[in-house]
Image (spheres, rainbow, N blue to C red):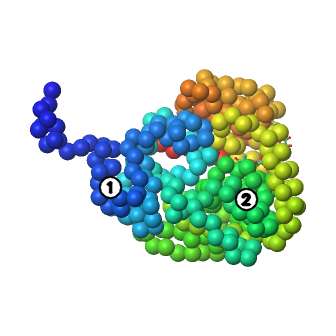
Amino acid sequence: MKSDAAILDCPPQGSERLAAALADCVSGETVIQRDEPLARHTTLRVGGPADVLVEPASERDLAAVLRFCAARGVEWLLLGRGSNLLVRDGGFRGVVIRLAHPHFSRIEVNGCRLRCGAGAKLKHVVAEARRQAIGGLDFLEGIPGTVGGALRMNAGAMGRALVDVLETVRFMDLEANIEERRAADVGAQYRRCVFLERRVALSAVLAGVPADRQDIEQKLTAFSRKRRETQPAAPSAGCIFKNPSLLPAGRLIDELGLKGARVGGAVVSQEHANFIVTERGATAGEVLELIARIQQKARAERGIELETEVQIVGG
Ligand code: EPU
């Protein structure tokens, strides 16, 4: 056994050293957690720990984190609500950044435009739009994400996607410069925004239209009923696969007879076949194995390549 003095002489290792070095670069208001299980921060509720999870308290601290990672070659990952993320059981070696500090979740209203912080939850955006009688943003109802995550994924529902209502996006690049661009210049595609893959969205201006509050409420009720009736309430990451061009992935997986198929605690939902739900104790490995089995059957029986919509990270 080492003496106390010898232990004090040892330089801290791995996540401890990373967390300590990072803490030296940011203000005391920035929250830094070490070896934080990411299962706690993803809606699938699986996945191993992040070496360091950091919640910057300001844009200045966020810039310091990005510069820190760039200077030391440390991998980083931006985490929203973790609703479209599958973290492998080995966790994430590096720094996971969450814009969970209130600084990043402001919503400011200007006429029919909402400037929303990247950390704001979509449900708060929808609630604010309803309060202000701003229509056109109702389709975001029930999408379990943050504005930043929705920008990065070009999230959508009810036949519309975020880019349809996006006016501008303000972001930080890898050198910590801040810029604002119009939606047309960020080139969002179906469930993808390559432009934001290595940039951090800070806020976005979403444009709605004047509407009657009762009409908005009716739409919200209808959307939320449709979601309740067709999608599972159990832990999931939403749709696991992108819809291939020929037919919706949910219908395809249903036709393949895979509803209820399971690997350990990972199960193809009975309510919607493009959802994998997890039971208590499920692992990321089980979810990945189930994904592979579905892909294999779709390929073998229908010649269709199913591409995951969920982002798979970690080791
Ligand atoms: N279907 C089946 N069996 C199933 C599930 C669906 O036959 O188990 C059929 C439905 O009856 C329908 C068709 O497949 O005819 C499409 O289903 P749905 O209307 O549920 O839409 P989806 O294409 O499966 C998309 C988005 C969802 C979004 C819904 C509602 C994708 C990959 N998915 O689902 O988004 O909530 O529309 O607007 O684009 C997500 O992105 O994570 C997500 C859940």
Q: Secondary structure at mark 2?
A: helix
Residue at left 66%, top 63%? 188
Within 10 Å of the Cα at label 2, are there few (<14), some (14-19), or many (20+) other Cα atoms?
Answer: many
- Above or below 292: residue 216: below
Which quadrant of the frame does ligand 1 lie within?
Answer: top right
Front-most of 84 and 106?
Answer: 106
* Count of marks placed on residues: 2
Locate residue 67: give its quadrant.
bottom left
Front-most of 67 and 243?
Answer: 67
Image quarter of the N terminus = top left
Whether label 2 lies within 8 Å of ligand 1 gets the answer no
User: Where residue 223 sits: x, y (%)?
Assistant: 82, 50
User: Where residue 190 sits: x, y (%)?
Assistant: 71, 57
Q: CA distance from mark 2 to mark 1?
A: 35 Å
User: Where residue 115 sits: x, y (%)?
Assistant: 64, 70
Horizontally, is 190 left or right of 30 in the view?
right
Residue where numbered disc 1 is placed: 23
Residue at left 40%, top 59%? 29
Horizontally, is 296 left or right of 82 in the view?
right
User: Tag on residue 105?
Assistant: none
Q: Earlier in the sequence, mark 2 or mark 1?
A: 1
Amino acid beneath label 2? Val
Check the image and name the residue furthest to the front: 131
User: Tag on residue 126?
Assistant: 2
Q: Secondary structure at mark 1?
A: helix
Horizontally, is 82 left or right of 211 in the view?
left
Q: Are marks 2 and 1 in contact (CB under 8 Å)?
A: no
- Above or below 203: residue 299: above
Whether label 1 lies within 8 Å of ligand 1 gets the answer no
Image quarter of the C terminus = top left
